[in-house]
Image: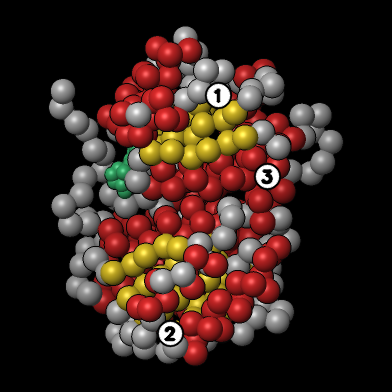
């Protein structure tokens, strides 16, 4: 079967999140004195998928804690440290499925040399170089994969950033942890997600894919774009909702699917953008917590009861299925994207 591993990895995310959550508390307790320090700034870093994860994690962190946070590619922190790191030491949170990507390793070394501090590392492989060379490793226990394109590893590591954030804002553990609801929410949605996305992917009149996300959903939109590119070799682009009007909309035509990742707080403005693109001929897919008041050709309703700040992993499985089924439709093997390897390692 083409894409056997990718398919299993997408489908098993509920289980992967449960496994990751089971060991999260214990691990994060070990580093709670690091995350709760009064840092002036948090820098998240990674490459490819894990850079996009860094983007969404940083915005969530700043929104929830009020601490300045940014997400940067590992290569930028390595090659241009002066434009990323300031005089006062930030906390670096490096994210890498493999724990072996050279650029992220070099970003970590730059940080260590500059401040004589260890970063927090989030990864799926406990024996990897990044995890063994820091005092603050955080394992996404359910996230390991056989496929090249990240699916359950991405959502499991994203879950761990959500967990770190939750620990920071609920230090006394007084409130029920919203993340514990996510595995069940996924299990309820997975068959519907698959069925809906397969049908859309099989509609070959759609040839171009645009993913729109505002605020914390922008990094998620970028990751959805990457899945579509890696697995199905389709033209796909991510934008902030409101930015899409400023030029890119010139490309809208009847061969385009525009996916809107609806943010609860800004849905009205976002729906206006989608309605305008519908007028230009695009087909619209909205992914939203509540379908109330949403008009689109296709709607995925999450109905999870989880706040948008802690719901990141739930947006993605539908879009992973979309990329997977479009790859199959294109006769490609989603497990082995063209020209790609699981890890990018650079020689000296
Ligand atoms: C990062 C990454 C992946 C991409 C490809 C190459 O790896 O860029 O996002 O899909 O497999 O590597 P990692 O540092 O998260 O292991």
Which residue is identified by label 3?
Answer: 63
In this rendered view, identify the residue nearer to me: 164 or 9: 164
Residue 329 sits above or below residue 304 on the image: below
Which label's residue is closer to the chain start, 1 or 3? 3
Quadrant of res 249 = bottom left
Which residue is identified by label 2?
Answer: 282
Q: Position of residue 112 (x, y in %)?
A: 42, 15
Quadrant in the picture for the C terminus: top left
Q: Is residue 190 visible?
A: no
- The residue at 40%/71% (across/down) is 248
Q: Residues within 10 Å of mark 1 (few under 14, many from 20)?
A: many
In this rendered view, identify the residue nearer to me: 296 or 10: 296
- The residue at 76%/29% (across/down) is 171
Q: CA distance from mark 1 to mark 3?
A: 17 Å
Residue 273 sits above or below residue 31 on the image: below
Q: Position of residue 286 (x, y in %)?
A: 55, 75
Which residue is identified by label 1?
Answer: 91
Which label's residue is closer to the chain start, 2 or 1? 1
- Label 2 CB, ligand 1: below 8 Å? no
Residue 344 sits above or below residue 285 on the image: above
Direction from residue 124 to residue 181 in the image, left or right: right
Residue 323 sits above or below residue 150 on the image: below
Mark 2 and mark 1 residues within 8 Å of each other at the beta carbon: no
Q: Specify the quarter for ligand 1.
A: top left
- The residue at 40%/12% (across/down) is 113
- Describe the element under mark 2 as helix, strand or loop: loop
- The residue at 63%/25% (across/down) is 40
Direction from residue 208 to residue 71 in the image, left or right: right
Q: Is residue 84 visible?
A: yes
Direction from residue 227 to residue 88 in the image, left or right: right
């Amino acid at each position: 079967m083409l894409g056997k591993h990718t398919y299993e990895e997408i489908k098993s995310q509920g289980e992967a999140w449960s496994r990751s959550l089971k060991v999260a508390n214990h691990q994060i307790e070990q580093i709670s004195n690091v995350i709760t320090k009064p840092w002036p700034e948090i820098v998240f870093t990674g490459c490819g998928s894990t850079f996009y994860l860094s983007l969404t994690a940083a915005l969530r962190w700043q929104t929830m804690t009020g601490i300045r946070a940014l997400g940067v590619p590992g290569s930028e922190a390595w090659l241009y440290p002066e434009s990323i790191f300031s005089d006062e030491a930030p906390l670096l949170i490096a994210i890498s499925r493999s724990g072996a990507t050279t650029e992220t390793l070099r970003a970590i070394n730059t940080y260590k040399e500059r401040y004589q501090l260890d970063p927090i590392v989030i990864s799926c492989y406990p024996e990897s170089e990044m995890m063994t060379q820091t005092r603050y490793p955080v394992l996404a226990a359910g996230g390991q994969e056989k496929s090249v394109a990240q699916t359950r590893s991405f959502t499991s590591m994203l879950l761990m950033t959500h967990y770190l954030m939750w620990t920071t804002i609920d230090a006394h553990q007084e409130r029920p942890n919203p993340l514990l609801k996510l595995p069940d929410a996924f299990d309820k949605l997975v068959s519907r997600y698959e069925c809906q996305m397969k049908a859309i992917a099989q509609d070959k009149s759609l040839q171009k894919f645009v993913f729109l996300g505002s605020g914390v959903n922008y990094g998620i939109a970028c990751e959805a774009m990457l899945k579509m590119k890696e697995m199905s070799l389709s033209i796909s682009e991510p934008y902030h909702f409101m930015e899409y009007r400023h030029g890119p909309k010139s490309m809208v035509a009847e061969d385009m699917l525009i996916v809107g990742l609806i943010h609860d707080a800004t849905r009205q403005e976002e729906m206006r953008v989608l309605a305008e693109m519908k007028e230009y001929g695009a087909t619209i897919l909205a992914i939203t917590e509540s379908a109330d008041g949403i008009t689109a050709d296709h709607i995925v309703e999450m109905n999870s009861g989880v706040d948008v700040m802690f719901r990141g992993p739930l947006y993605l499985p539908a879009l992973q299925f979309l990329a997977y089924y479009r790859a199959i439709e294109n006769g490609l093997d989603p497990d082995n994207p063209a020209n790609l390897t699981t890890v990018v390692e650079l020689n000296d």
